[in-house]
Image (tube, grey):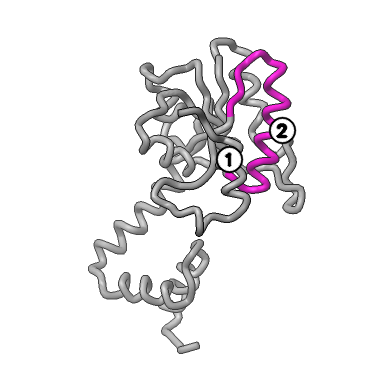
Amino acid sequence: MPDFAAPLQRLIDEFRRLPGIGQKSAQRLAFHVLRSPRDNAANLSAALLEVKDNLGICAECNNISDAELCPYCRDPHRDRTKICIIDEPHNILPIETTRTFEGLYHVLGGSISPLRGIGPEQLRIKGLLDRIAQGGVEEIILATSPTVEGEATAVYLSRLLKPLGVRVTRIAMGIPVGSDLEFSDEVTISKSLENRREM
């Protein structure tokens, strides 16, 4: 590994801590910062600190927020009868970009994973139960990831929520539009057959 001046090496090391950033990417980023005007570095530094200092968790749905409630929970036009359950805050964006869901969200903060020591008690399920108990919720949409952990979480929540008298649905999973059957694995094809609908 090449020897860099200590401040540059420290910056490279910090960039390497970021997910998806390897040694070469970290070096490119560090050299970019080094070549950029000081104002750019100051703006980057200020943005990083602002994220840490001014963002928190929504008191209602556990989404990232700069206020007590996130923009979705504050929006009076959202359909409060539907709550979409997701693993992490970044899972909201793909749903929102469809412009078809107008309900609210509930962020669990992960999914059940016994191998990683994450059980239902580590997830933010109590807040969801409190929201349902307040009344007005008619449907819970389980949009957890299509992984073994996401499926386990969906099954657990379904069994927990159905006795509460709310409709519990699961997002459909299967072959993506524009894909070819030849390149789909057996689990994806199985889910596609399972989630088929009449035409």
From this viewpoint, which residue is outermost toward the top? 135
Within 10 Å of disc 2 (Cα), the crowding (few <14, some 14-19, many 20+) is: few
Above or below, comparing residue 104 to residue 111 in the picture: above
**Callout 1 amino acid:** Leu
**Separation (CA) of disc 2 from disc 1:** 23 Å
Secondary structure under badge 1?
helix
Quadrant in which residue 35 is drawn? bottom left
Q: Based on the displayed image, in which of its 4 quarters is residue 129 positioned?
A: top right
Does 177 sit above or below residue 11? above
Residue extent of the magenta highlight: 146-169
Residue at image x 48%, y 68%? 14
The residue shown at (30%, 60%) is 42
Residue at the disc numbered 2: 156
Instruction: Residue 149: say if magenta.
Output: yes
Say which of 26 and 111 sits in front. Answer: 111
Tell me where residue 40 appears, x and y as whole percent.
26, 62
Residue at numbered disc 1: 193
- x and y, in percent, of residue 28 in the image: 36, 75
Give the percent coordinates (x, y) of residue 130. 63, 19
Of pointers 2 and 1, the one earlier in the residue sequence = 2
